[in-house]
Structures are given as structure tokens and as C-alpha cells.
Image: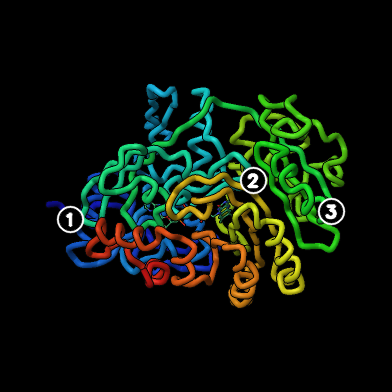
Amino acid sequence: MTDVTQSVTTQPAGTNWAGNLAYSADAVASPRTVAEVQELVRAAASAPSRVRALGTRHCFNDLADTDGLLVSLAGLDPVADGHLQLQTGEDGVTTVRASAGTRYGDLAAALLPLGLAVHNLASLPHISVAGAIATATHGSGDTNRGLGGAVVGLELVTGTGELLELRRGQDGPVPFDAAVVHLGALGIITHVTLAVEPAFDVRQDVFQDLPWESLAQHLDEITGAAYSVSVFTRWNEGGPDQVWLKSRMDALGEGPLGEGGALAYQDDFFGARRATTALHPLPGISAVSCTDQLGVGGPSHVRLPHFKMEFTPSNGAELQSEYLVPREHAVAAIEALRGLRERIVPLLQITEIRTMASDGLWLSPAGQYDAVGLHFTWLPLQAEVEALLPVIEEALAPFDARPHWGKLFTTDAARLAELYPRLGDFAQLAETLDPAGVFRNDYLDRVLRST
Ligand SMILES: Cc1cc2nc3c(=O)[nH]c(=O)nc-3n(C[C@H](O)[C@H](O)[C@H](O)COP(=O)(O)OP(=O)(O)OC[C@H]3O[C@@H](n4cnc5c(N)ncnc54)[C@H](O)[C@@H]3O)c2cc1C
């Protein structure tokens, strides 16, 4: 057997995107074939040592960390080499199989010439497919499930080096809905198959200064006014600063509410006024990095994220947290956070409120119900932020707030087990697929501890 740890290219592990974590790994290996991934995992299992996949480094916590070897899938079947495999099933649904390390923005750009699109995107398009679904990454939209909601197939290398193919609707010993939001605990995912849609255009309209009363009284109309809606707030007394409406062009004209809504509201959107210049979510910052606004239509993948693919931030002076609450608790949860504004504002850059449809995935914060996400982009003051998070978590506890797995949170294992009825089953599944614990790390030891 060749010593794959010698033949695969490696580089220093470095830090995560935010720069708040230096990975403890020895190095990042970049295998070019699935067989090399299997060899790396087998080598770790027999050492014994640890190994873990690394995506595009966008987690704000130590979820991706390991004290062994990190493995990047970026060099495995890159999209640019024409490795997209399309298939249309008997149900008429078209699927695409892509390498796990593919960035969503690259995938979407490659799909467009084929007349296809992914259903939704996160706020930025630079995030890898397997890393995004690992943590239940989502965009916004009342009818849009998180990005994992489109996954119909997974190919992964388990902790014993075995190659496993999972397919939605064909459950074997590994339930498919358990494996999509995977926390990197079940294996190294090598390929992901996603359901895609006919390409569609989106226009983006921004409104400013929404009164709090409007949000409380008309939340459903506001978040239902376009395909994807984001409300940005700095928790000012008057109300949220901006509302971004991303409307499907093929649904325009169905207004006054529903997806055609952006056109129905000329200058007054529930008391907010239409912006006449392009805006960054943070006041005073140039909108040059933001996706085009002012109602100009364009392909969905250059409107649904907030930020453009060509502005590749190597790191960011920010931290993030997010809590998802069942939709019926959203107004009360927002009120509870307003009560904490004196504590939140000194550490905050911006809060974003988004919606997502229930996706049925075991570890998705929107797994069992339609949810509203309450997101915080913090100043890079980790100690202060971590001191405030328990206060926020306590205020949101009556609303069953589930933290975003990839962002900063302090919710402990016992509480997570209450919030996720299948967390114990997931922990058992991880042990079955990874008996030697090669994918385990401090994060998994913490969150799967009491199960
Ligand atoms: C600026 C910024 C904006 C963001 N916007 C959003 C947003 O709009 N919505 C949202 O929900 N989240 C958002 N996030 C959070 C982000 O989407 C998640 O943290 C996501 O998990 C990051 O993906 P990644 O590829 O960078 O993963 P990494 O941080 O590299 O890894 C995340 C996890 O995935 C695992 N993993 C990665 N690849 C594989 C693989 N091939 N096989 C097995 N496991 C793997 C890693 O081991 C780790 O456990 C944002 C983050 C940043 C920095």
C-alpha cells in the first residue's frame, strides 16, 4: 500500500475565515481522488489519529478543527473541469452531482448556461456545499428550505474508510434525513447530489426604516412579500434599518402580496420607504460588494446572496451568532431581544432576520417547523460576545431557540438534547459510522456529550 500521507499535497492549516480560530491540525491535505480520501481516513484510523474535512473555513467556532489532519476536497473534481453530472428522474426533477468542496457560487455559475439554478443561496456564495449543509446553512424565504433541503444524494467515506452512497427515499441503516446536517461527524463527504430547478431571474428592492409596530403586526405579509426577504436591524428605537426583498421575476404580477410584492409597494412598504441608492446592510459602507439592487433583474445566483462572488473576502473583521425560533414565537422573540438592546448594541454590527421552511432534517434548526432566524454579526470581540451569549440564550429559551451549528453559541449538550429529539440517535449513528472516533473533536465531544 502506498503511503498516501506522503504523496498527497499538504499545506499549513492556518485559520478560519474570521481569523478567530487557528486550527490545531498538523496540516491540510488535498487529495485529488476518492481513493486518496479513503486512504487518508484508513491511515488515521490505524495510526490511531484523527482526520476531519475542511470546507471553505467559514465556521466561527471549532467545529472544523482537529488535532490530526484536515482534508480539503477543493481539488477533487472541481466544477471548472466539467465534472457536473446531471440527471432527470422519472419525477421530472433534475439533479446535479458535484464534488463536496465545490463552492455554491461556482456551482450556480456552472448551472446557469445549462438553464438550471439552485433553489436558494446563503448571504455569501463562497461557502462549500458539504460545509454548508454540515451546519444547516440557509438563505431566506418562507417557502425556501435551507440549502440541505435540496440534497438528494451523498457519497461519503466513513471512519473505517468505507465508501457509502446514500439516496433520499432509499433509507438503509443510515436514515437520509440524519445525514444531511452532518456536523462532519459521519464521514468525509466526497460528492453531493442536489435537486436543481429551471434557471430563474430575481430583482432586489430595498426599503428603509421599517417601524417595529409594522414588523410585529405584519410579520407574515412582510416575510411573504418576496421569494427571499431579509430584515436588517441595529435595534434602534424606531425600527429595523432595511428590508431586502428578492423577488422572482417569473412571479411578478401576482401581487399585491406574495412573490410579486416588491412591485406592488411603490414607495411605502409597511411604513418603510423605497431606497433610491444601493445600500450595504451596514450604514455608511459602500454597496460595491453587494449584489445589485434598485429593482434590476438578474440571474438568481447573483441576487439571492447579499454579497458578490467576485469580492472574495479572505477574512472578515466580524463574528456571528444566530438562533432559530419556531415561526409562531418570532414576534415575542424579537421583543425579548429588543429588551436586551442596551447589552447587544455595543457589540453589534448588524442583526438580520430571515425565514426558512421546515426541512425535516434531524439536526436542522428548522427540521420540525417553519422557522425565523435571528442573526447577529458582531464586532470581533470574542470574550465580550461569549459573555453576552448566555444572556441572549436565556432570553430566547422560552421560544425554543436553536443555535446555528456553525456560529458562536454557548448552549450546552443537555439543552441541545432537549431541543433536538434525534440528537441521541445522531450520536449513535456517528459512533456506528466512526467506531474509532477519527472524526471526533472537542466540539463534537461537547455537543454530543450527554447523549
Ligand atoms: C461571512 C459569512 C457569511 C455567512 N452567511 C451565512 C448565511 O447566510 N446563512 C447561514 O446559515 N450561514 C452562514 N454562514 C455560516 C456558514 O455557512 C457555515 O458556517 C458553514 O458551515 C460554512 O461552510 P464551510 O464550507 O466554510 O465549512 P467549514 O467551516 O470549513 O466546515 C464546517 C463543517 O463542515 C465540515 N465539512 C466541510 N466539508 C466537509 C466534507 N466534505 N465532508 C464532511 N464534513 C465536511 C467540517 O468538518 C466542519 O465540521 C456564514 C459564514 C460567514 C463567514
User: In the structure shown, which secondary structural element does the residue marked by tag 3 occupy?
Assistant: loop
User: CB at mark 1 closer than 8 A to ligand 1?
Assistant: no
Can residue 369 be seen at all in this image of the molecule?
yes
Q: Is residue 207 left or right of residue 354?
A: right
Label 1 Cα neighbours within 10 Å, binned few <14 / some 14-19 / many ≥20: few
In the rendered structure, which amino acid carries the disc numbered 1?
A: Asp
Judging depth in this view, the residue of 93 and 50 nearest the camera is 93
Is disc 3 in contact with disc 2, using a CB cutoff of under 8 Å? no
User: CB at mark 2 closer than 8 A to ligand 1?
Assistant: yes
Label 2 Cα neighbours within 10 Å, binned few <14 / some 14-19 / many ≥20: many
- For the C terminus, the quadrant is bottom left
User: CB at mark 3 closer than 8 A to ligand 1?
Assistant: no
Name the quadrant containing residue 297. Answer: top right
Q: Which residue is mark 2?
A: 307
Q: Which residue is mark 3?
A: 211
Mark nearest the camera among 1 and 2 is 2
Cα distance in 3D space between marks 3 and 2: 26 Å
User: In the structure shown, which secondary structural element does the residue marked by tag 1 occupy?
Assistant: loop
Can residue 70 be seen at all in this image of the molecule?
no
Residue 191: image location, x then y, percent: 35, 41
Is disc 1 in contact with disc 3, using a CB cutoff of under 8 Å? no
Q: Which residue is mark 1?
A: 3
Q: Residue at left 57%, top 58%?
A: 315
Mark nearest the camera among 1 and 3 is 3
Residue 201: image location, x then y, percent: 64, 28
Name the quadrant containing residue 51. Answer: bottom left
